[in-house]
Image: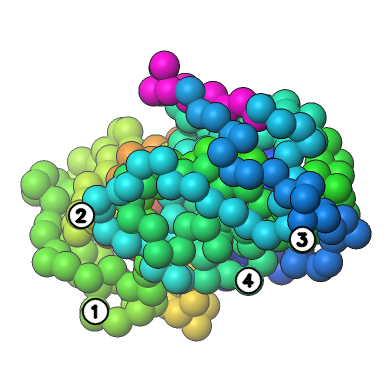
Amino acid sequence: MRSTRLRLVAAAVVPLALLTACGDDATDAASSSSPTTAASPLTVAPDKVTPITAAAVSQSNPAKPTMKLSTTPFQVNATTTKVTKQGTGKTVGAKDIAYVSYVAVNGTSGKTIESTFGKPNAAFNLGNPGTFPGLVKALKGKKVGTEMVVAVPPSEGFGAQGNKQVGITSKDTMVFFVKVNDSMPLLTEIKGKEKQPSDENLPRATVPAGAGKEAKITEPKTKERPTKTVSEELITGEGPKVVEGQTVLVSYTGKIWGGKVFDSTAKQGGQPATFALQTGSAGGQQGVVPGFVKGLAGHPVGSRVLVVMPPADGYGKTGNPQAGIKGTDTLIFVVDILAAI
C-alpha cells in the first residue's frame, strides 16, 4: 500500500480534468494544464471589460444549474465576483480545503466547459500557491452555502500557456458559477474521543496523541476472521465523506492478523501518505488494494477507521513477500483520514 509521500500537500489539488494541477512528481501532461500566475499576453482596455452582470445563472433545476453569457467575448483584467446567495455556514479559511460544485464557461465562446454539479465535490487547497489563483482569491473568506459568479482573467487562471486539453487559450477569461459546499483545515492529526468496535470479534486499537503516531493493535482471541472487508470508525470526523477515486491524505498502521506491523507512516518519519482511493493506477496516481477502497469510502474526513480485510481484498493469493505478507494473511489497518481531494 506504499505510496508517494506528501504528494497531496505539494499538489494544487483539484481532481477534475479542467482544473488539474501538478504535484512535485507530476507528469508532463499534468504540468501542461497547471495554473500559473505568469502574466498573460492579454490586457483588456478598460472600456472592453465585461460587467459581471453579463453572466446569468439559471437554477430552474437546482441540481443542475446552468450559466449563459449575454456578451462574448466576456473579458476581465482581474478576478471579479458577484455573490448571488450569502451563505450562513462556517467561514472558509485562508489555508482551508474548500469543497465546491461549479459550472465553468469559456468567456470567449460562451460554451460550458464543465459542470461538477451532481458529482463528488471539487476540492481546492487554498493554502497552496499553485492552486487556481482566481478561484482561491474568490473563495477565501466566504461562508459555506455561498453561491457566486466568478470571472477569472488568464493571468489568474491558466496563464500564458492556457489549457489545450479543454480548449482554453491565453486570451480566454473563464467564468464560473460556484457553490461552496464545505470547508475544513488540512489536518495533521485526528483528535476526539476514541471508541472501540462494537463487534468483540474485531481487533482493538489505540493511537497515541500527536501527529503520525503508530497504532497499537490487539487481535481478539477468536480464531474466526472476517471473510469480507469490515470497517468501523474509532473516531468519527466532521468533514465530507470520502468518495472512491479521490486522492486521500492519511496516517496509517498496517498489521498482519496474528503477526507483526508490516508498514506504518510512523516508520516513514511520521509523514502522511497520499494515494488515489482506487484499485490499480490511473492518471499518474498509484492505487491501493481493494480492501482499502472498500474500507475508507463513505467515511468522513477527520475519522480514524479500523479496516480488516481478508486476503482476497488485500494482496491476494501471492501475498506481498517484500512486506512479509503471505497469501493467507488477513490484514488490519488503522487509518486516520486527514484530507480527501
Q: Residues within 10 Å of mark 4 (few under 14, many from 20)?
A: some
**Residue 32 makes an appearance in the image:** no
Residue 268, compared with residue 307, is above or below; it is below
Q: Quadrant of residue 22?
A: bottom right
Q: Which residue has dot 2 on it?
A: 236
Q: Residues within 10 Å of mark 3 (few under 14, many from 20)?
A: many
Mark 1 vs mark 4, CA separation in Å: 33 Å
Which of the numbered marks, if any, corresponds to residue 129?
A: 4
Mark 3 vs mark 2, CA separation in Å: 41 Å
Mark closer to the chain start, 3 or 2: 3
Name the side, left or right, on which 251 lies relative to 280.
left
Mark closer to the chain start, 3 or 4: 4
Q: Residues within 10 Å of mark 2 (few under 14, many from 20)?
A: many
Estimate the x, y position of residue 244 in percent, counting from the top left.
Answer: 47, 38
Q: Main secondary structure of the magenta part?
A: loop
In this rendering, the label closer to the viewer, 1 or 3: 3
Q: Which residue has dot 1 on it?
A: 208
